[in-house]
Amino acid sequence: MKDLTISRPFNEDEYNELLRQAVAVIEISRLQIAKQLNTVAMSSYWEIGKLLEEKKIDSKHGDGIVKRLSVDLKSKYPDMGLSPRNLWDMKKFYLRYNEGDTKLRQAVAVLPWSHNLLLMSYDLSSEHIVFYANEVVSKGWSRDMLRHALKSEYHLSIQVVEKSNNFDSTLLAQQADYANEVFRSSYNLGFIDAVEPLKELELERRLVQKITTFIMELGSGFSFIGNQHTLTYNNKEYRVDLLFFHRRLRSMVAIELKIGEFKPEYVGKMNFYLSLLDKLEKAPDENPSVGIILCAEKDHLEVELALQDVNKPIGVAEYQYLLPKNKLQELVTDEIRKSKNL
């Protein structure tokens, strides 16, 4: 019997979508495998730290014992990272979380060891440790990304900044509630490795270059459609900086990048783009398109007034990828002080 499958070449957009989905599958699988391996490793480190504490081995009298233990363990398990310093860190790990609640222990148990060491080097509450652990797992943060977030006190910016959007007045109640969960008021773009302010096109280029990481920062459910997405109407072309689709919202999500502070006129432009998306590309079974204006800073009251009479769902969020000057100065001062104490 002949194979009746019709073979045809993929166009470029179809291939790019296939590639994107395949990459997403692999990334998710790798995260799941890493999570399982981390849990096993953390269990071993926890138990070794517990042993050192129970045997009353401290840094004052037990240095020789720990060095000998390190040599003997490394001869049996050369790939486990069982240096004297690591063994002391295991004890520190046990002592830090021994009296913590189940939620805290479960949060740190799935992190890579290097991430846990970094978290322990900061004076954080249990609540904030859980927050960062969840961010690492859900968004696949590298150690450098976690370091950047910690240095910029990302947990404080998330908690303090008010959400600036009109979702409650432009979306159905259930969808508005979910949109408020999906979209945040502040995003950490430290992964783009910028050491000085960027122009809008360069910022967009770097985000597209690291689109998988950017999607992890946005949260689950986002699929990337493209950048500089062209909308043609009345013989004119308009371009959306970044266009996504969110599976659970069943909405297209347009993101406009602004390198400076929020300006009220940005809302009118976004409202127009959303009208075009809904008119030209929204499927009958999809919900209204959502717009996010991503800028360097915003004034909540100004945003609230600008959105007051707008009928399209729009949110305004801040981003940060550079450390503030005062924070940078503090870090430099701390590094100088530490080097003098060595």
Image (tube, rainbow, N blue to C red):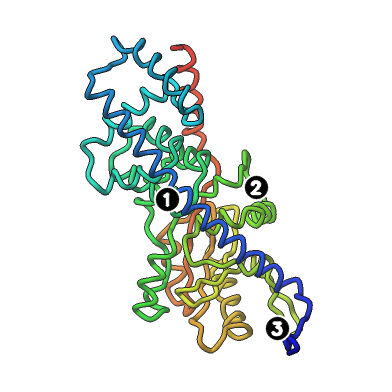
Closer to the camera in the image, 167 or 248: 248
Question: Does residue 45 appear to the left or right of 257 in the view shown?
Answer: left
**Secondary structure at numbered mark 3:** strand
Circles 2 and 3, Cβ within 8 Å, touching? The answer is: no
Asked which secondary structure carries label 2, the reply is: loop
| Secondary structure category for the residue under label 1 | helix
Crowd class of label 1 (few under 14; some 14 to 19; many from 20; radius 10 Å): some
Kind of residue at disc 1: Glu
24 vs 229: above or below: above
- Which residue has dot 2 on it? 198
Marks 2 & 1, CB-CB < 8 Å contact: no
Q: Nearer the viewer's eye, disc 2 or disc 1?
A: 1
Foreground: 186 or 103?
103
Disc sitting over residue 284 in the figure: none
- Residue at (50%, 18%) from the top-left corner? 336
Name which residue type carries label 3.
Tyr
The vertical placement of 241 against 125, above or below, is below
CA–CA distance between discs 2 and 3?
Answer: 31 Å
The foreground one among 103 and 323 is: 103
Instruction: State how far apart marks 1 and 3 are (Cα).
Output: 40 Å
Is residue 44 found left or right of 194 in the rendered image? left
Q: Position of residue 25 (x, y in %)?
A: 56, 62
Query: Residue 342, image x and y in percent?
Result: 46, 12
In the picture, residue 126 is in which quadrant? Answer: top left
Q: Position of residue 338 (x, y in %)?
A: 45, 18
Q: Mark 1 sits on what residue?
A: 135
Distance from disc 2 to disc 1, alpha carbons, whole Å, reads: 25 Å
Q: Which is more N-terminal, label 1 or label 2? A: 1
Q: Which mark is residue 233?
A: 3
The amino acid pointed to by label 2 is: Leu
For residue 238, above or below residue 136: below
